[in-house]
Image (cartoon, helix red, strand yellow):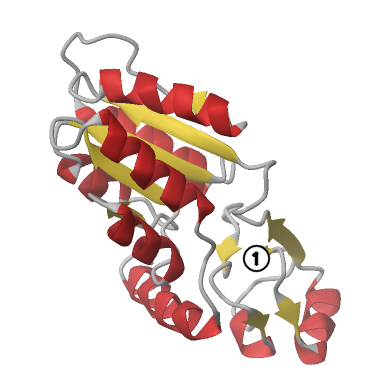
Amino acid sequence: MNSDPLDESVKHVITESDLRDVPAGGRVRVREDALITPAAQDLIRDRRIEIVRRWNRTSNRRIVALGADHGGFDMKENIKALLDELSVQYRDFGTFSTDAVDYPDFAHAVARAVADAHCDLGIIVDGAGIGSCMTANKVPGVRAALCYDEATARNSREHNYANVLTLGGKMIDTAQMRRIVTTWLATPEGEARHGKRVAKITAIERQYSR
């Protein structure tokens, strides 16, 4: 049996139908404040399903995965300084110099860290931010957003529940980066009406991952 948990963490309410296809002994990731209906609780007990509560993304205890290619290295180092100022923990997945490397390697590492719940959020920087965004979104459970100002940063979190942010190190300056990252980290996932739409993204993803 696949040990990866079923990700239902975009939903505010977990019902019996959400768990119907979970095998006995399976695992399901839900948001920290998710409500589980009585019928769903009965199914959890009967099948001995493990519920993995995902930390609230606005909590100070979150850990951010960082990654960059050579074009984003300098900005990644500036992001680390910003996270230190904000007292946000992080893990640096490289690269560690301006020597030429391949952006998919580092984008994949960050995306896997988020998808596997080793880190709560991810930030990736390459020259334009586009390639890293494409790469990260190939990993099931990742919702990566390329943001270029405070409005897109806020929207990606509130409306789309983005868990990975990508930036173009050659497209924005340090001041813009600081505004984007600070806004992105400070914006919580939006209310249930947004979660229902994000759940449809997850449903589409599952159609192609079987």
Q: Is residue 2 above or below residue 190?
A: above
Image position, residue 191 (x, y; %) = 54, 79
The answer to whether residue 111 is seen in the rendering is no
Image position of 170 (left or right of 46) = left
Where residue 178 appears, as percent x and y from the top left, is 37, 37
Of 192 and 138, which appears nearest the observer? 192
Q: Position of residue 180 (x, y in %)?
A: 35, 46
User: Secondary structure under badge 1?
Assistant: strand
Q: Is residue 194 above or below residue 132?
A: below
78 left or right, relative to 46: left
Name the quarter where the N terminus is drawn: bottom right
- Judging depth in this view, the residue of 193 and 93 nearest the camera is 193
Using a 10 Å C-alpha cutoff, classify the residue at mark 1 as few (fewer than 14 neighbours), some (14 to 19) or many (20 or more). many
- Identify the residue at horizontal 67%, vertical 81% (top origin): 14
* 41, above or below 59, in the image: below
| Occupied quadrant, residue 33 | bottom right
Please state, as top left, top right, bottom left or bottom right, where the C terminus lies in the image.
bottom left
Residue occupying image coordinates x 50% and y 45%: 121
**Count of all numbered marks drawn on residues in the image:** 1
- Name the kind of residue labelled 1 in the image: Arg
- Is 1 in front, or is 7? 7
For the point 43% across and 62% down, the residue is 157
**Residue 85 found in image quarter:** top right
Q: Badge 1 is on which residue?
A: 31
In this rendering, does residue 79 appear at all?
yes
Judge by depth and name the residue closer to the eye, 180 or 128: 180
Q: Percent x, y for residue 139?
A: 36, 50
Please indicate whether residue 31 sits to the left or right of residue 113 in the image. Answer: right
User: Horizontal placement of 22 versus 67: left or right?
Assistant: right
Residue at point 39% right, 33% down? 109
